[in-house]
Amino acid sequence: MTDLVTLTRTLAEPDRDLVVLAEGNTSTRVDDGVMLVKASGSKMATATDRDFVEVRTTPLVELVASAESDDAEVNRVLLDARLDSGAPKPSMEALLHALCIEEAGAEVVAHTHPTAVNGILCSDRAAELVAGALFPDQVVVMGRHTVLVPYADPGLALARAVRTELHRHLAQHDRPPKVIYLVNHGIFVLAASADEALAVTEMTVKAARILAGALAVGKPTYLTDAEAERIDTRPDELHRRQRLAKGDSR
């Protein structure tokens, strides 16, 4: 819990420009079929242990995979999924957190709305964010392939859109993404630890700023597939990536 609260408050530091007010949410796996996720309406900047709720993930994943449901059903499932019926209501985006944990194997998930990233996600150039890598450390920290999800109504519709693109990515690349971009919305970061979640978020923001600069002066020059693959598989870079996942970025 301490790591999750620290991550949550760190992501909300004003100078990072990742969230304001009650935007964003975080989660972590706590046991098989159980996650800890930020409660609806809680502010990341002032988060404490009381702002998180333990939730069963299976009912949420099953809801996303179901054919039909309405807002009332979503609300009922979210409330019934709580281990403690007296706990706060989970964030609506708990549906996406459950997907990232159960279907993509993430241990920690961080959802933010970075201004630098949303400046591109809210433009007609959003696809450039997933067109390739611009620099080596982007590959090391964020992986070679990320996911772009078209705009969908936040909540169940968005969770279903993410599920579709996540399954497509897993089938194509045989490993989960570290970043899911949501058009006109924000990002989901999938990580092995709270430290990695912060590092990936920071690198995603840096990559967006570099991309915006490249678009302002011309066309982005992406690394070739061979160049990106070389970075992705070099022993020294794999070592750095492993240490990053464990919370040691040196």
Image (cartoon, rainbow, N blue to C red):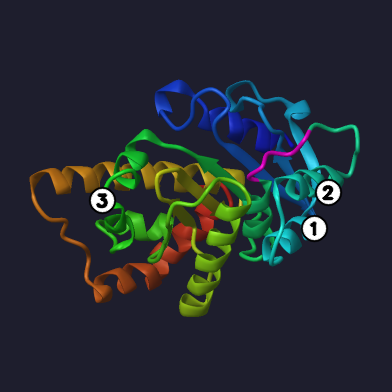
Residue 146 location in percent, x, y? Answer: 42, 61
**Disc 2 on helix, strand or loop?**
loop
Tell which circle, 3 or 1, labels the residue nearer the N-terminal end. Answer: 1
Few, some or many C-alpha atoms within 10 Å of disc 1 (few <14, some 14-19, many ≥20)? some
Q: Residue at x 74, y 55 (%)?
A: 60
Few, some or many C-alpha atoms within 10 Å of disc 3 (few <14, some 14-19, many ≥20)? few
Q: Is residue 145 visible?
A: yes
Residue 214 location in percent, x, y? Answer: 16, 48
The amino acid type of the residue labelled 1 equals: Pro
Say whether residue 37 is left or right of residue 21: right
Quarter residue 206 falls in:
top left
The amino acid type of the residue labelled 3 equals: Asp
Are the residues at dot 2 and dot 1 in contact (C-beta closer than 8 Å)? yes
**Disc 1 on helix, strand or loop?**
helix
Q: Is residue 191 visible?
A: no
> Tag on residue 89?
none
Quadrant occupied by the N terminus: top right
Please name the residue that numbered disc 1 is placed on: 59
Q: Residue at x 73, y 29 (%)?
A: 51
Task: Give the dominant element type of the magenta stretch: helix, strand or loop.
Answer: loop
Q: Residue at x 65, y 66 (%)?
A: 103
Residue 115 location in percent, x, y? Answer: 36, 34
Work out how far the residue at label 3 is from the one at label 2, CA to CA, in angstroms: 38 Å
Tell which circle, 3 or 2, labels the residue nearer the N-terminal end. Answer: 2
Please name the residue that numbered disc 2 is placed on: 81
Please name the residue that numbered disc 3 is placed on: 124
Q: Is residue 141 magenta?
A: no
Provide the residue span drawn in magenta.
89-93
The amino acid type of the residue labelled 2 equals: Ala
